[in-house]
Every structure is written in structure tokens, then in C-alpha cells.
Image: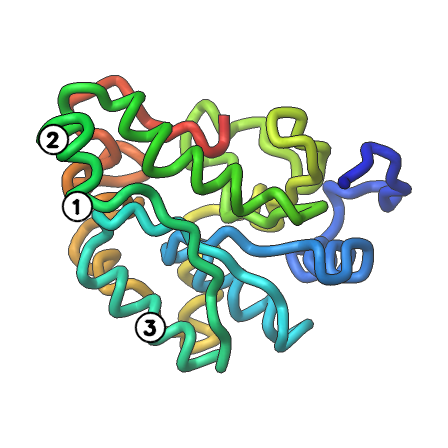
Amino acid sequence: MATTSLELPNDVEALSAQEVLRFCLETFPGKVSLACSFQKEETLLLDLLFELEPKARVFAIDTHYLFPETYAYWRAVEERYDTTIEVFEGPSAEQLEATHGPSLWETKPDLYLSLAKIEPLTRALLDLDCWITGVRRDQSPTRANAPKLAWDEAHELWKANPLADWSDERCWAEIRERGLPFNPLHDQGYSSIGDVHSTVPGSGREGRWAGTDKTECGLHV
């Protein structure tokens, strides 16, 4: 079980993304994993992570409503890095409809998110002492104070956000410099990519849960 007692580097916020990842890999061997949603941030983190540890752990939440492009990129990531991403699934579309009726994401979005994302995430974190995410401070006001590494009180383990101080422009510059393939939806105007039924093109996180006041699905708040 993860413990809050940990000797952190003197100035965590001064660490580079690579240094944050290295610290996590060395401090939580076998008990740290990257939460991958197959967006540009994970494109970078995957490459940085596997540079340091070719057998690093990565997990993804499959809501069964991801874009076809996302599933295709998922397969490409596994092939590129010769890895198998751990999968944590929400209920299937058939199960959701049988139990709650059609279009649960429209009728009861909070219940949908709880079943499709939050419950699978809870299972994914059970055997971890630390998880790594692509959260950046400039993505939304709710993420503006995200630390590079801190205790995650909500999930009772450590949480690393190695790209917390990176801008969109810096992410893309590094992706280009490394020549990395990325989710093609980014080239179609999707800055942030989620489920088919709740994502439209837009900058930042404005394309997520369009038509509602939501910008977060509950995984990071």
C-alpha cells in the first residue's frame, strides 16, 4: 500500500519531465504506471518513459466509446514499443443500455462517467504506489495548480504530472523533433480527445462535453 512518507527531491518543480519519470521509476519499481488516453501528452510521455524503462507499465481505460482513430493509434503504440497496455474496461454499450437505457451519457452524465471511467480507474490504481498522467496546467482552470509530483489524497497514492509546466506549443515541438506518430484526430481539430459521443473539435478542453458546463470527467478532480 502506498505511503505518504517519501523523501522528495529538494525542488520537485525544477525537475525536467525526464527527471520526474526517472524518480518515479526508481522510487516505485514495478508499482508505477502511465495512465494513457492516447493524446499528444501521452505520445510524449510514452516515448520518454520507454526510453528510461522499456518494460514500463502503461494502462488505459476502455469506455467502449473511444474513436476508431484512438483504437488504431492504441494498436500502433503497442507495436511501436513492443508492449501490452493494461486494459481496464467500463461496462459494454449493451450492458449500459440493458441496465440504464440508451444514451446514459446524455440522461445521467455523472452516472455514466462513474461507471465508464471512475470505477475502472479505481481498479487500475489498486496495485500501484504512483500513477503518471499527462495533466498540464494550461489545459483548464481546474488544472492550473497541478504539481509535478504530489500525494493524491483522493486515490491514496502518489501522482506525477511530468508535463505540468509544458505548453501546447512545447509539446508539439518535442513531438516533431522526435518524429513521433500521434493520434490523427489532433490534425482534425481535436485538441482534447475523449469518447465519440461527448467530444467535438475545439482548443484546450472546450471540445470535451460540448453543450454542458463540464470540462472534467472526474479522473483528475
Identify the residue position indicated by label 2 in the image: 103
Residue 125 % position (x, y): 59, 44
Indicate whether 195 appears above or below 76: above
Q: Residue furthest left?
A: 102
Q: How many labels sit on residues?
A: 3
Rendered image: mark on residue 75: 3
Which residue is more in the foreground, 74 or 141? 74
- Residue 161 shown left or right of residue 198 in the figure: right
In terms of secondary structure, where does tag 3 sit? helix
- Colour setup of the view: rainbow
Classify mark 3: residues with Cα within 10 Å, few (<14), some (14-19) or many (20+). few
Residue 150 is situated, as x and y percent measured from the top left of the image, at 71, 35
Disc marking residue 196: 1
Q: Nearer the viewer, residue 1 or 9?
A: 1
Q: Amino acid at mark 2?
A: Ser
Name the quarter where the N terminus is drawn: top right
Q: CA distance from mark 1 to mark 2?
A: 12 Å
